[in-house]
Image: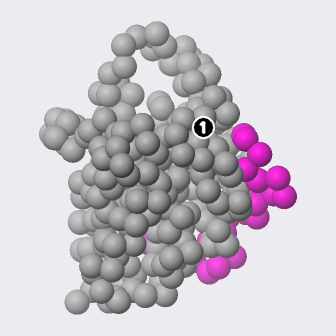
Amino acid sequence: MATGRTFVLIPGAGSDAWYWHRVEAELGGRGHQVVAVDLPWTDPAAGLPEYADAVVGAVAERGPAGAGDLVLVAQSMGAYVAPLVCGRLPVSLLVLVNPMIPASGETAGQWWANTGQPEAQREMDLRDGRRPDADFDPFVVFLHDVPQHIADDSARHAANPSDTPFGQPWPLSAWPDVPTRVLTGSDDRFFPAEFQRRVARDRLGITPDEMPGGHLVALSRPTEVADRLEAYAAAGPAERLGGQPPDDAGSGG
């Protein structure tokens, strides 16, 4: 039986647990337990509360191992879900990877305009010589740094999410009292690094850590992601926090 920590891994919108499979193998090989979660993205009857239920249920299926020392890791829109779990499970650390950091009362549909994401992506595209008005191509935006065989397989694990979670206001009045880290891919073409730095600072008072890689770093650089997660989990509480939320955290980025 694994003797390390328990890492609970939440995918981003439209992704399934497969998104984390390379990181899961890395962490499992190092003696940790891993719970990679499937969320009901395509179910129009399911929204943020049901997604939180799915995380709690997935952990419960694995039994009591790791109780009191769960490291909860959320990719992209998974950041709308992970904080809802912190009051229901003994989470010792929350790690957000290229996240959509929510504000109180804000829907995931409003997040884009509230944070200025479209403008930030457009500016980066123009700077890097990409056409910002080109048809969306996941191989350009998401999979540009992912090994080809992994990128080719990714289509089997992607689905169009329902509109339900995008229309639900984020229900928490404040960020949970859990040490939080933000990890940003310096080559993310969807959420540019400078944009992520601004949103994390404005909404959480946290300066993100940066690593090479695009939006889907768990697929492109699993060893380094696992290294980062292990280091975060091993750090002391002060090191884990990464910064105190400002008084007006969640004011809209």
Q: Decide: few, some or many residues near mark 1? Use Cα within 10 Å; few <14, some 14-19, many ≥20.
A: some
Work out whether residue 168 can be spotted: yes
Q: Give the quarter of the figure containing the N terminus.
A: bottom left
Q: Is residue 18 magenta?
A: no
Work out whether residue 209 can be spotted: no
Residue 94 or 47: which is nearer the viewer? 47
Q: Is residue 17 left or right of residue 208?
A: left
Q: Give the quarter of the figure containing the C terminus.
A: top right
Q: Position of residue 57 (x, y in %)?
A: 34, 73
For mark 1, what is the residue? Answer: 111
Task: Answer with the quarter of the image where residue 136 lies.
Answer: top left
Kind of element beneath mark 1: helix
Q: Position of residue 141 (x, y in %)?
A: 39, 28
Extreme residue in the front direction: 45
Residue 209 or 162: which is nearer the viewer? 162
Q: Is residue 208 left or right of residue 233?
A: right
The kind of residue tagged 1 is Trp
Q: Position of residue 230 (x, y in %)?
A: 44, 72
What residue lies at 54% left-to-right and 14% top-to-bottom?
A: 126
What residue lies at 54% left-to-right and 46% top-to-bottom?
A: 168
Residue 29 or 69: which is nearer the viewer? 69
Task: Answer with the quarter of the image where residue 83 lies.
Answer: bottom right
Q: Which residues are magenta?
A: 226-253
What residue lies at 71% left-to-right and 62% top-to-bottom?
A: 174
Vertical arrangement, residue 129 with respect to residue 45, above or below: above
